[in-house]
Structure formats: structure tokens, C-alpha cells
Amino acid sequence: MSTPDVQRVDSATGTLADWNAAGLLAAADLHITDRLVRMCGESVSDDARLGAALAVRAVRLGSTCLALDRIGELAAGEDTAEIEMPSPGDLLDALAASPLVAGSDAGPLCPLVVRDSVDGPLVYLQKYFRQEQTIREILDRRSRTAPSVDTAALREAIAAVYSSPDDGALQKLAAAVAATRWTTVLAGGPGTGKTYTVARILAVLDRLQGPGLRIGLCAPTGRAAAQLQASVEAESTLPVTAHAVTLHSLLGWRPGSNPRYGRGRTLPHDVIVVDETSMLSMTAMSRLLDAVRPDARVVFVGDPHQLASVEAGAVLADLVERTDVPATAETDGSPTTPTQAFDAVGLDPAAEDLDPDDVARMADGVITLRRQFRFGGGISQVAAAVNAGDPDAVLELVTSPEIGDVELVAPDDLDGVAGDILSWGRGLRTAARRGDAAGALDALDSHRVLCAHREGSWGVRGWTTRITDWLGTTEAEHMGWYVGQPILVTANDRQTSTFNGDTGVVIAGPDTEPQRANRPDSSDAVRVAFRRGGEVRLLHPTQLADVVSVHAMTIHRSQGSQFDQVTVVLPPAGSELLTRELLYTAITRARSRVRIVGTADVLTAAVNRRVQRASGLRSTLSAI
Ligand SMILES: Nc1ncnc2c1ncn2[C@@H]1O[C@H](COP(=O)(O)OP(=O)(O)OP(=O)(O)O)[C@@H](O)[C@H]1O
């Protein structure tokens, strides 16, 4: 599929110029390819140059490499009819023979690497190949040995920590796996009890190790870290001494410099929990693994079906799907097999209704939680059908009268949405005028409109205009602060502990007279309410530098948030953003109800289209 609005490079010639003109290669792809070719110091054939440019393009679009066997998918659009598309075999031969891969006397550097995989030949930029190798080597090394754990002590700790009758087998097994492996992946959709389980894993490890367990809690963004802190505190069975930080801060990694912690100086923690791992780039993952002590446990937590990092890599999905994890070779009798894990939690595998694949993956340190604790049946069923890539099942569910919590509405049938927005706005204003911060925040999160795009009539901009028109927001309100105004923070601010993506609401301040609550004289009379975990905070508007009104937000930005009701606005057919992962992420933001605005055709297209991030991490690579 072509990339819209790629910049034309007038100076380009040959094959790359044609691909640029057809919108398949961006200006940046051409410029970087030029640099790579110059590094070689020798001439490079047109086909090899194209292979290099496509590898650069692949990274720009989130893959860690170019899967040569899939290049045919690129020429699917009408505007690519004129493009001459070499076969994967021709490109591979041209690359293998070129100084870009083979090196040359003039320039010994080989900026590209080619490897064979179960997905056919993969072409890497050297940097990403090295990062992927680092991840693979460290994870493999960590899999070959296991922590020394006394089975009886583990059984006792798990029995003591998991005391609720609702504790599921997989939640308990997660603790057995995390105690007996250096690396654990705890996967699951929203509300499947991941944080609850993390808190219990930490309690089990604390019991096994005794006082002084050094815990590192981190997440890819400031907001995700703050949420992790709040939810671990809420779920914890112990006083939480660790303070959740961003991965960058954990590693002491400032923009433009190398991290303070790395191979030569490892992190002091005994256990590191990484939340929202789906948002982690491959670069960040390789830096983290480089910095972890070989005898520290790491627990990666997240939902592999969600949208991946904005940078290259889909590491969580790769870890969950890896097929070549080496078996643990060196143990001192510690329980490392799935059978031993069942024994440690006092369960009989035959009596548990678990997917055999899930049990098999436990041997590789992967636990996938499946029971839904938070939202209703319809949302779970639709989310599962979306993940399974079954558009017929999705359509049947969203149009079924039996399923009350998910519905599809036509883009020209917005009366129901308008009614919901009006009651949302009324609830927000009523609580805000009363100065009721908790009530206003509840009202704020009772409904959210989510769009794929920022711009356009189906994007955040178009829907913001539509919603403010419905609500009758005045010109004066548009210009300044007003009571009942929904607010989005757009940059991290340590001083106020507000993070990019936080939302709040403007409420009447303590000195506002009730009769003036609708129109306070100045920003002095109002406060902005925010919530983190169960705690409500009030800030003065002057404390907030980077904020905008929020009546609708992008699905990307909504990651990590939950709302009672969600209206998902699908983009028009053909949008680059329309994917299964986007739809799944949007639907699973809702606790109780989802309305999808779009046509059956667009919904089908979304379910059918996966974010295809090529990567070699899922299986063994070999030389071509
Ligand atoms: N075994 C359990 N017994 C009782 N309540 C549970 C159990 N597991 C989870 N819960 C509750 O279910 C809710 C969702 O759990 P939790 O927040 O841990 O899910 P999550 O997978 O981390 O969700 P998200 O990804 O959205 O953060 C919480 O209120 C939690 O207390």
C-alpha cells in the first residue's frame, strides 16, 4: 500500500525516483539510502539500492527488517501500476552481491545484513540487526539457567499470597513461573488481572527472598509509569517501597546520550517489572536487557494485541510468539517445568480447563491471562473475534440484538451519539459547577469519542467541532478556561506530576459563588481536577503549561485509559491506520459499552488488516 503525502525528491533518478513518484518511498528513505551507498564507497546496482531503500522504509513504518517475500504487497495500489517490481529472488541476489551486504575494499562497513528465517529472507539495517541479536542472545542466555528456588517454600508463599477464591489457576501459575525463571512474560487483555497478579508475584518473591528485595518498576511513558505506581499500590499486599519510573529514567538515559546503566554497569534491582511492554521499541528493549543483571528477574507485562510502539519493533508480540526459546539446561532441582509449576501452586493440570498451548508456553516463561474481570460479555466476545481476524463473527456480534453492549451505527445515523454526548456534557458541567471534583472526573470518563486520525472530518479535529456544536460551547469558552471544560495534558511536567495523555476537568474553585459558578470571572476562580488511582488532585490553571481541551482523542493516545462508554469513529476505507490492532485497542478502552461509527465494509476491512511488523525475533535466523 502506498504512503500518502510522501515528499517528492526532484534529484532522484532511476528505480528509486519511480518508487518515490508512486508514493511508495519517502524522501527520507531515499536520503538514508544515499548515505548507506556512500558508506560503501563503491557503485551499487539499482536493484540493491531498491532493497536498501525498502529496508529503510520498513523501519520507518515500524518493522525491524524487510521481509523480502512480502514485497509484492506493496504494489497493491492503482498508482503503483507503472512500477517495475523485481522478484524477491532478484532483490536478494542483487543485495547479496552488493557491497551493502558483502562489504568492499573501498569501505569495509556493511550497512545491511541479510538472514534467512521461517518468513523467508529478511533484510536488516546493521543497527537493528545488532539490537535484535542482543535481545535474542540475552534472552536465550537467561533461559538456559534458572533461579534457585526451594519448592516447598514456593508452595507456601503462593498459598499465603493467593488467598482470594477468585484467584485463577493462571494467576497463581504466573507466580510459580516468575519465581522459577529469570524472564517472564505476563500477557493479557485489559482487566484480565495483570496488575493484580504482578502485585502478588512481587509478594511471593518478597517472601522467598526475605527483606531487602530490590524492585524496579518501569513503563515506556511517564503516564504509564504513574498509573503502574497507583495500581500496584492499590493491588499490593505489601507496602510498596519501589517508585515506578519511565524506562529511560530507570536506565539513566537522556536524549542524545548513552544510558548510565548498560553492559558495563548493571542495574542493582533483583526484580524488574516492565508494564505496557507493547509500547516498548526494540531499541529500548535491547538497552534494558543489556543493563539487567543475569541474576535479576524481569517480568514483562502487557497486551500483545494492542497497538505497538511508535518506533520500530513489536517486542511483546514477538516474545509471546517466539518458537525457539532454549530449554533450561542448568538447574539445581528448582521447579522449572509446567508440571512442577502446577505442583508448586497445588493444582492438578488435568483438572484445570486450560488451553494446552498456554501450558506449553509456560515452559518458555510466557503466561497469558484470559479471564475478564472488568468488562461485560459482549465487549470481550467482540474483542476476541477481532483478534481472531473473523470479520463475519464481529459483524454478527455488533448487529445482534442479543449483544447489548456493542453496536455498529452508520456514519449518518448519529442521533444516539449526540444524545449520549449531551448527557455526558450535562453531567460534566453539573458536577463541575458544584465544585465536585470526583463527580466531574467520573462524568469525564463516563464517555469518550475515539478517532483513528487527528485531522479530517472523521478525525479528532472534525469530531471536536461536531461535539462542541452539539454542546453549544461558546466562542468565549473556546478562548479560555471554563467550568466543565475537559482538559488533555500534552507534555510531561514533573513539578505537577502531570503527564502527556492525562485528562482532567475544570471545576468551580472554592471561592466561586454558586450563582457565578457557570461563568467565573477569571482563571483564579477555577481549579483543574485530575485523578491518579483513587487519588483526586486539584491544580491551579496557571500551574499547567501544556494543555488543550479534549472532546475526542486519538486511539493511539487512549492506550492505557479506560472509559465507561466509548464511541469509536472508524476512518474511511483505505486509511493506512485502519487495522485490527487499532480496532481492538479502541474497543477494549470501554468498561461497559461500545458504539462503533462506520459501515460494515470498513469494519470488515479493519478486522482483515493486521499491522504487519516484520521481525526476526520470533524464530531462528540463519545465514543465506
Ligand atoms: N483474582 C482476583 N480476585 C479478585 N479480583 C481480581 C482478581 N484479579 C483481578 N481482580 C480485579 O480485577 C480488576 C482488573 O484487574 P487488573 O487491574 O489487575 O487488570 P489489568 O490486566 O492490569 O488491567 P489493565 O491492563 O487495564 O491495567 C481489578 O479491580 C482487580 O482488583
Image (cartoon, rainbow, N blue to C red):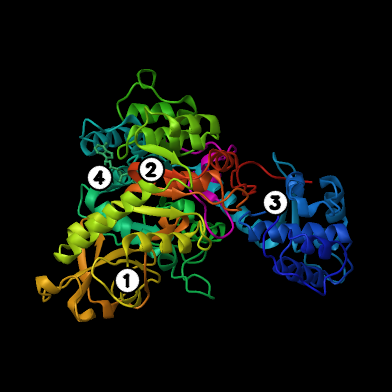
Q: Amino acid at mark 2?
A: Val
Do labels 3 and 2 touch, CB within 8 Å? Answer: no
Marks 4 and 2, how far apart at CA: 42 Å
In this view, the mark in front (3 or 2): 2
First along the sequence among labels 3 and 2 = 3
Check disc 4 and report its element: helix, strand or loop.
helix
Tell me the number on the disc at residue 589.
Answer: none
In this view, the mark in front (4 or 1): 1
In this view, the mark in front (4 or 2): 2
In this view, the mark in front (1 or 3): 1
Q: Amino acid at mark 1?
A: Thr
Residue at position x 38%, y 61% from top?
A: 268
Q: In terms of depth relative to the viewer, which is nearer, 485 or 47?
A: 485
Q: Position of residue 620 (x, y in %)?
A: 66, 42
Q: From this view, report whether residue 542 is shown above or below residue 151.
A: below
Marks 3 and 2, how far apart at CA: 30 Å
Q: Position of residue 332 (x, y in %)?
A: 42, 37
Residue at position x 21%, y 72% from top?
A: 527
Q: Position of residue 384 (x, y in %)?
A: 46, 34
Residue at position x 20%, y 54% from top?
A: 239
- Quick check: is the Cβ at mark 2 less than 8 Å away from ligand 1? no
- Circle 2 Cα neighbour tier, 10 Å, few/some/many (<14 / 14–19 / ≥20): many
Marks 2 and 1, how far apart at CA: 29 Å
Residue 324 falls inside the magenta stretch: yes
- Image quadrant of ligand 1 equals top left
Tell me the number on the disc at residue 594.
Answer: 2
Tell me which segment is drawn in magenta: 305-332
Q: In terms of depth relative to the viewer, which is nearer, 621 or 546?
A: 546
Marks 3 and 4, how far apart at CA: 53 Å
Check disc 3 and report its element: helix, strand or loop.
loop
> What residue sits right under mark 4 in the picture?
207
> What residue sits right under mark 1 in the picture?
474
